[in-house]
Amino acid sequence: MNEIIVLVLVLMLLLLLWLAWREFANSKNNVLFTQLENKHRAMLLDLNDGLNKLADRMNVASQGSAEALKNTVSQELLATRDAMQALQLAQNNSLAQTRETVLETLHKTLSEQGKSQQALINDTMLKATTTLTQSVESLGKIVDARLEQIGGKVSERLDEGFKKTNETFVSVMERLATIDEAQKKIDGLTVNMVSLQELLGDKRSRGAYGEVQLEGLVRNALPPDSFKMQHTFENGARVDCALLLPAPTGTVAVDSKFPLENYHKMFDSALSEAAQNLAEKQFKADVRKHVDDIAAKYIIPNVTSDGAVMFIPAEAVFAEIHAYHPEVIDYAMNKRVWLVSPTTLMAVLNTARAVLKDVEMRKQVHIIKDELGKLSKDFERFDVRMKKLADNIRQAHDNAQEVHKSSQKITNRFKQIERVELSNQTLSDVSGDLLDSIDDKEDLV
């Protein structure tokens, strides 16, 4: 806009100069030329004054626009920050509701799966028992004394199989009973749950809550001999949890800290902006103080590892630190203190469990190899015996078929004798068949 006004003024100035030159060319009187020159000078002075005044007005207007724009931007920034805080609170509430819904769904799914598996196992065992019993009874009716002996051996094998199956079934029932007990405990905890807001209102309650949550996560993830709760070091410092990991890591201290008061003040809309900023500074100072305490107490040369872990029980507090306060994270890293939340702590514990499992596997690898060799030999013997049993059953079936054929032949011959349909040749055939039948029976015996 300023450039357009200057361009217009320059054009006007050129036009006045052209008019002055034209009048000068047409004028023949020097006096008239002098008068015109004076007049033009006066016009140029007036034009210069007008340009200066216009420039002053434009400066004043631009300063007013800048102030208005600055105020507008400040208001929009405040409104954006309030909206971000409201959105973060809504996300935290949504995450809490989603977690409760997932836990309830998981409990119901585990209960339903346990019941369906128990019913399926019962039906399968009932059908298998009925089928095997019918097979044994039919074999007992068809075969003779030799088949009965073979049937006795088969019964022994089946009894062993039934015994193993029953043992497996009892083991499954015990596991289902354990699952039912766990479900009852979970239901009891759900009924007796208190308000989390009331629990976290007091510093001691927050500390106890963090220690209980830390202990639950560690006990669920690691074997009992790989950690110690409320462990006291040689310098007298007592840590919430000490992870006993193999070399070169060694003992890792894990301490629970819960900086919550100033965190809530940071997002309290009832407070002024100055109070919220002060709470934010105090929140960062609290976290740094916790880091300093952990580094001073729980990083002991030649006793613990060269680092320690600070456990923050609230995911929201952990996310706030990582998202908006990277200088605090850098400060903790320089102190060799790692900040973790319940989710990230589970990743650390799973890694530690994998290391412990690998160490134990290396210690027990020779025992596993020996047991696998024994199991392979047992399976080979079982395969050979099953083949022998199958051959015996097939031979018994063939013998029974032969006996049945001989019986049919003898029966048909006796019927012919009763009808007096035999000739001499027929009588010789009958006697030969009888002798063959007798020989067959003797062979079977």
Image (cartoon, rainbow, N blue to C red):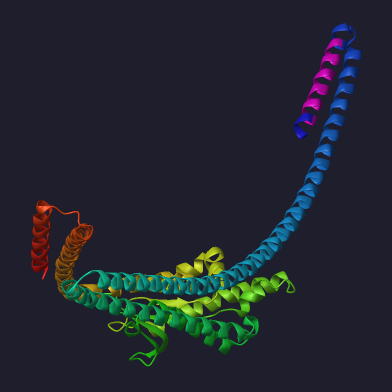
Which one is in front, 298 or 12? 298
Placement of the C terminus among the 4 image quadrants: bottom left
Q: Residue furthest bottom?
A: 236
Task: Say if 64 sits above or below 309 in the image.
Answer: above
Q: Residue at x 10, y 63 (%)?
A: 440
Q: Residue at x 49, y 81 (%)?
A: 180
Q: Residue 317's quadrant in the figure? A: bottom right
Report if residue 14 lies within the magenta region. Answer: yes
Q: Is residue 34 left or right of residue 434?
A: right
**Percent position (x, y) of residue 256?**
48, 81
Q: Quadrant of residue 31?
A: top right
3 w.r.t. 129: above or below: above
Instruction: Please state the extent of the stretch shown in magenta in the rendering.
Output: 5-22
Q: Picture coordinates of residue 252 (x, y %)? A: 35, 79
Q: Residue furthest front?
A: 420
> Residue 184: horizontal and vertical position, in percent?
53, 84
Question: Mostly what secondary structure, the magenta segment?
Answer: helix
The image quadrant of residue 220 is bottom left
| 373 left or right, relative to 131 | left
- Side of 339 where 277 appears, left or right: right
In this view, the residue in front, 277 or 390, is 390
Seen from the viewer's position, the closer of residues 130 and 24 is: 130
Magenta segment includes 309: no
Answer yes or no: is residue 341 visible: no
